[in-house]
């Protein structure tokens, strides 16, 4: 305990180091909070864009469903008919001849 008087002149240096360390830790915490906020804002912007695209698709689907005109059904049937005509136009492979049985 006789050597405790040596710590008295070192106290300002120890307190100064402690204050610098706490200020640095506070700065690191602020940087962490800022980067988390930036990440959350970026993620929110991406979600908002996705939601806007989905809402636009939903509006198109609602307009198709609630159209009430017979034109949509006719257009769908016309597309089906066109596919059937194209399928008939494209020739398939020639049929395979039936194997002949040989009796011995």
Image (spheres, rainbow, N blue to C red):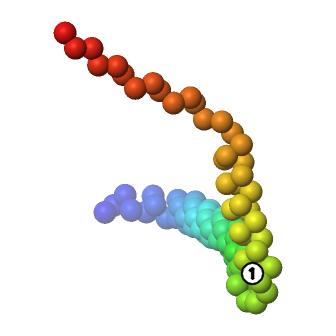
Horizontal side of residue 10 vs 86, given as left or right: left
Residue 98: x and y in percent read: 40, 26
Q: Residue at x 39, y 62 (%)?
A: 4
Q: Is residue 80 above or below residue 97?
A: below
Tell me: 100 left or right of 91. Answer: left
Q: Nearer the viewer, residue 14 or 5?
A: 14
Image coordinates for residue 86, horizontal then vertical, percent = 72, 48
Q: Residue 77, located in which quarter of the rendered image? A: bottom right
Q: Splitting the image into 4 quarters, where does residue 30 fall?
A: bottom right
Residue 88, given in percent of the width and then of the height, sits at 67, 46
Which residue matches tag 1? 64
In the image, farthest residue toward the top: 104
Q: Can see residue 3?
A: yes
Q: Is residue 35 left or right of residue 12?
A: right
Screen quadrant of the N terminus: bottom left
Image quadrant where one finds the C terminus: top left
x and y, in percent, of residue 13 in the image: 58, 60
Q: Residues within 10 Å of mark 1 (few under 14, many from 20)?
A: few
Residue 46, by quadrant, is bottom right
Q: Residue furthest front?
A: 104
- Kindly identify the residue that appears in the image at 76 percent across and 65 percent down: 78
Which element carries disc 1, helix, strand or loop?
helix
């Amino acid at each position: 305990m006789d050597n405790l008087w040596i710590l008295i002149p070192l106290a300002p240096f120890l307190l100064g180091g402690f204050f610098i360390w706490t200020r640095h830790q506070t700065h690191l915490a602020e940087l962490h909070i800022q980067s988390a906020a930036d990440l959350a804002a970026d993620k929110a912007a991406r979600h908002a864009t996705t939601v806007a695209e989905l809402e636009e698709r939903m509006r198109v689907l609602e307009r198709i469903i609630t159209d009430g005109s017979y034109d949509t059904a006719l257009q769908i049937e016309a597309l089906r008919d066109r596919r059937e005509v194209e399928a008939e136009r494209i020739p398939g492979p020639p049929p395979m001849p039936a194997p002949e049985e040989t009796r011995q």
